[in-house]
Image (cartoon, helix red, strand yellow):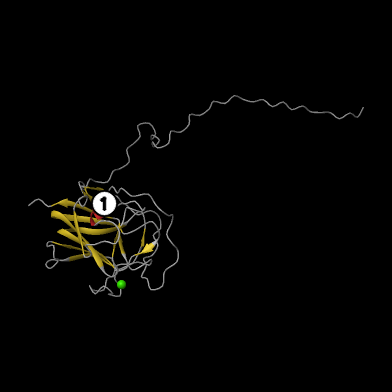
Amino acid sequence: MNGRRLLIVTCVLLSAQFQQPYAGGQPKPDREGGALKPQPADDGTAPLALNLPRPAFKGTPKHVPPGSNLEEPRKGPRPPFMAPKGTKNVAIGKKVTSSDDDPIIGEIEMVTDGDKEAGEGSYLELGPGTQYVQIDLGKEHEILAVLLWHYHASARIYHDVIVQVAFDADFITNVRTLFNNDHDNSSGMGVGRDKEYWDMYEGKLIDAEGVKGRYLRLYSNGSTQDDQNHYTEVEVFALQVVP
Ligand SMILES: [Ca+2]
Ligand SMILES: [Ca+2]
């Protein structure tokens, strides 16, 4: 008699209308009549479009090698670099010379051949000590930025990175220094106030602030890996100066 009463619970499944999946990549429209977001006034500039090589390693090493003058680690992605519209890499295919005209590995032309990948066959090796590569843009340009890769197959810090611009190939008159991280003047070209940095796939982006010139020289003096000097690619973002 004391039989337990069993309750049978019947679950009723209510049919539900499936939502349309969100088509990612496109921003959702604003409410009806959606007011447009305010756009900044057109000042004639746009973010520089950088074409970066594939990363060969992830992240940035956390340790600070002894004797280095390393920059503070950056938080988040590199901010966009605003430049006048029409600014482009004018170094591609341009003539390159060097303080070492007999590279240990590779050819001088590799500095401006457009190949900036990390692998073997994509970099040039110059001899030990302070060396430079020099790019002739062919004509005077207004230079907005320099993007530079020494070697990014593994994490290294290159020493005495110095970037200069001049009107003459011999760098005698009107030489301007865009970047110098030779904090102890070991290359003898003056003490630089810029910081050392880890070479990596995104390259070192140097603000040239619209300086005018035809020739660029990029110095280095070995790295945390060895005494040789490596160059994978140099890009010079500029506008041609109309005489
Ligand atoms: Ca190259
Ligand atoms: Ca130094």
Q: Quadrant of residue 205?
A: bottom left
Task: Say left or right for 37 vs 23.
Answer: left
Question: Where in the figure is residue 231, as x and y percent of width and height?
Answer: 29, 59
Q: Residue at left 18%, top 65%?
A: 176
In this view, the residue in front, 86 or 199, is: 199
Q: Is residue 208 above or below residue 19?
A: below
- Nearest the viewer among 158 and 33 is 158
Give x and y (percent) for residue 14: 62, 25
Classify residue 66 by image quadrant: bottom left
Q: Residues within 10 Å of mark 1 (few under 14, many from 20)?
A: some
Q: Is residue 243 left or right of residue 236?
A: left
Please give the count of numbered marks on the rendered protein. Answer: 1
Quadrant location of residue 97? bottom left
Q: Is the CB atom of the residue marked by disc 1 within 8 angstroms of ligand 1's nearest atom?
A: no
Residue under the point 40% across and 53% down: 56
Q: In this rendering, is residue 157 above or below 202?
A: below
Residue 121 in percent (x, y) is at 33, 53
Q: Quadrant of the N terminus?
A: top right
Q: Residue at x 42, y 59 (%)?
A: 60
Residue identified by numbered label 1? 82
* Residue at the left extreme, as displayed: 243
Q: Position of residue 135 (x, y in %)?
A: 19, 58
**SS at circle 1:** strand
Taking the image as shown, residue 53 lies to the left or right of residue 6, namely left
- Tag 1: residue type? Met
Front residue of this view, candidates 211 and 55: 55
Question: In the rendered image of this protein, does residue 16 appear above or below residue 216?
Answer: above
- Quadrant of the picture in which ligand 2 is shown: bottom left
Q: Residue furthest right?
A: 1
